[in-house]
Image (cartoon, rainbow, N blue to C red):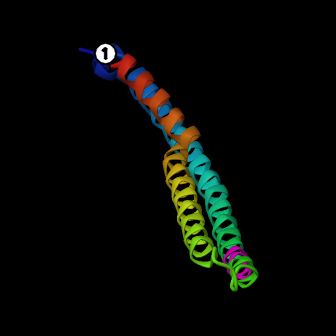
Amino acid sequence: MGRVNWAALLNLQGLAARWRSAMSEGAIAVEDRLELARLEWADHKRRLALLALLLVIFGVLGVVSLLLLSAAVLVQFWDTPQRAMVAWLLAALWCVACGAVLALLLSMARQAHSAFALTRRELAHDWRAVKEQL
């Protein structure tokens, strides 16, 4: 009696080859996604560093210039009856400016949600493809 090749009969070799191929493609896809995430992270870090530097520079220059402008306006109105009104108007102007800066900061914080959009979209697309195959 001859020996039966069960692996060939059940096509296990073809199944194993398909699994190896799928695993190889999956590994390549994971490497691609990790590279995309790394590139996006580097870009995001660069933008955050530049934003922080510009924010500090703008903050220092803005505070100095606005303080000098406020002092100049107060000096201009010092010997007039409107001195108190001008001081309160300057204080209100500073409060409005702080509110505007706070609104801009909140807006930027909301936009930070869009970081890594390409990576998230690719991973969602991959996840849908995997679920369809299951």
Q: Residues within 10 Å of mark 1 (few under 14, many from 20)?
A: few
Q: Position of residue 93 (x, y in %)?
A: 60, 64
Considering the whole magenta stretch, tell me its main secondary structure.
helix
| Residue in the image at 28% along x and 17% along y | 4
| Residue in the image at 68% along x and 84% along y | 78
Where is residue 127, by image quadrant?
top left
Observer-nearest of 40 and 106: 106
Observer-nearest of 47 and 27: 47
| Residue at which label 1 appears | 10
| Relative horizontal placement of residue 61, taking residue 49 as reference (left or right) | right
| Relative horizontal placement of residue 10, taking residue 122 as reference (left or right) | left
| Relative horizontal placement of residue 17, taking residue 44 as reference (left or right) | left
Q: Position of residue 55 (x, y in %)?
A: 65, 69
Q: Is residue 23 above or below residue 42?
A: above
Q: Which residues are magenta?
A: 61-68
Which residue is at the far left?
1
